[in-house]
Amino acid sequence: MGSPEVRQFNVHPGIIKHLIKEQAGTFVKAVVELVMNSIDAGATRVDLIFLENGTFTVKDNGRGFADRREIEMFFETFGTPHSEGDARFGRFRIGRGQIMAYANTVWRSGNYKMDVRLLSEDAPLGYSLHETVEEQAGCHIDGVVTDESVLRELHYSGLMKTPWCRPANSDFARAIRYLDVPVYVDDEQLNTSPATCKWSFEDDYGYYLFDESSEFIVYNLGVYVASAKRRDFFVGGIFVSKKPIKLNMARNAWLNHGCKVIENLIKVTNREFRKSVAKSANMNDADLGALIYKVARQSEDIKEDEASILFDKRFILDLSGKRLSPREFLKNRVFSLYDGESSLIAERAVAEGAIAMLIPRMFHLAGMESSEAVAIDFMHALAGLFGEFTDGWNIRFVKFETIKASYSSITERVADADLTPEQFAALKALRHVAKDIAWSTKDPAKRTRRIFAGKSDCAEAWTNGFDYIEINVKVLQEACWSGISTLPALVLHEFCHQSASSLDEHEHGIEFYKRFHDVVLSENFASIVRACQMKYMSLLLEAGINICYSDRRIATKMKRIVLQSDVVKRRIELERKRRWAME
């Protein structure tokens, strides 16, 4: 056997077509790539013209292609790497292929013309090279877009002047906003050199603008890369790099590891965030959300001196929206996550000093879901950061459902004056029929139980069994759009709780069910329901409130029945008179 043969890997031509068709994503991004190519070629000005028929021109005053050899190496061949320092943006000379996926193009440079037509599926993977008598300075690209979807994107991209979009406000303008080489669309310059702008901070790596916006926008040498959420860098604003950022092939994301520009950016933004937190007496929601996220997800990056500052910084929200510091919040030994609905129970549990309550809004500000797992992780992070300040504070989590079960009997009466007009109308309608319902259940109470409105996180209605019944204000309000027909049965249910509280009595005995069953099936109860509906609708009309569809339909049916009844009554009367006359 001989020595092993060393072989080179090869790339199939299909990969080149894939690179051309798949790497761009949008027509605007392909045009931005042409601008970057011009700057890599040393251009000091780039001009673009786009017309409504899909034709366009991109030209620059850069080096262009000096001879046939350069065309073969740098235009014909995809993937030829740049030498160190010979380009600001390019790495592998494949970006020019992006425009070829959207348009047929003709490239002119020096004494050469390259005609590229790759749009059809059966088009050969190549171009036509022509020698020209006239010499073209720089690089001049003419193209035509034929695909309808790409034409629509072009019309709305801002690359041409239209009644609904101006170049200065376009996606393209935002993409090249901070390039230091002038870029013109129809003779209007769209970019501004970062050296002429006002910044919060500047160093060898770039320009920094810090503000209270919810995102942090990153530009690589003046070209837009991506917008990060505020929580990713803990500040809002803009960063324009002076040195190249290591990017993925699509140039829409940076590499977090091994890029000195991004590493320095993280140091600068962290330092700015610490400064803003230290000097701010009352953080805005954006900073608060960023801090919550940092504590919950990146607590290991928080240094000891920073933790000592945060320990007395108020960034934890309580039920009332008040902000508490970890020192104040961690005085409790037990915590839970508020369900966002059962405010009476949550407030009682906190008021009795039994528990510390985390609220969903705090996690939503940080862009996190509000769940028990997230709440537990957050509390573990707090304990890890501030454990040395809390004398061995131990975490104990209690499910909110457990708390609800413990405080299920909590109710609060609501005065008539505090009700909405809709709620008060429903309450008065139920009071109108309360005496009839009490009589039908043979209620032993000496006086008819009074009907009030109330609040509860667990019950629709409740009673003490002898002198009052309270209806949840939520149920009273719902009658406005779902109808009141079910509410008399709810009041009946409470009247069937006789001499015992419905909040304490969780089981219904045989006597209760028999009492309820007998009344519901009686003809008298149907009359009670109709009387309640009629009273409710008349009260709504008096208050100028629209009647819901459900009650309106019932009223229409009742009217139809009454009319039919009147016809029958007249027939009976006529028949009686006819018989009397015959007699």
Image (cartoon, rainbow, N blue to C red):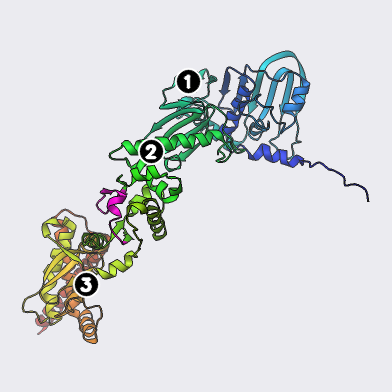
Residue 259 horizontal/vertical position (percent): 57, 36
Residue at the farthest right position = 1
Nearest-to-viewer mark from 3 and 2:
2
Residue stretch in magenta? 316-334
Q: Nearer the viewer, residue 549 or 137?
A: 137
User: Residue 229 got which mark?
Assistant: none
Instruction: Quickly name the residue at label 3.
Output: 490
Q: Is residue 560 left or right of residue 10?
A: left
199 vs 414, nearest the viewer: 199
Q: Secondary structure at mark 1?
A: helix
Q: Which residue is mark 1?
A: 195
Q: Secondary structure at mark 3?
A: helix
Q: Residues within 10 Å of mark 3 (few under 14, many from 20)?
A: some
Task: Locate residue 522: give its quadrant.
Answer: bottom left
Q: Please say whether residue 158 is visible from this viewpoint.
A: no
The CA span between labels 2 and 1 is 27 Å
Q: Looking at the image, which is closer to me, 80 or 562?
A: 80
The residue shown at (58%, 20%) is 46
Kindly indicate the quadrant of the structure image that contains residue 44.
top right
Mark 2 or mark 1, earlier in chain: 1
Q: Which residue is mark 2?
A: 274
Q: Amino acid at mark 1?
A: Ala
Looking at the image, residue 356 lies above or below residue 488:
above
Q: Amino acid at mark 2?
A: Arg
Residue 349: where, in percent of width, then height?
A: 24, 62
Contact between marks 3 and 2 (CB within 8 A): the answer is no
Q: Nearer the viewer, residue 173 or 78?
A: 78
Going from N to C along the chain, the mark reached first, 3 or 2, is 2
Helix, strand or loop status at disc 2? helix
Q: Residues within 10 Å of mark 1 (few under 14, many from 20)?
A: few
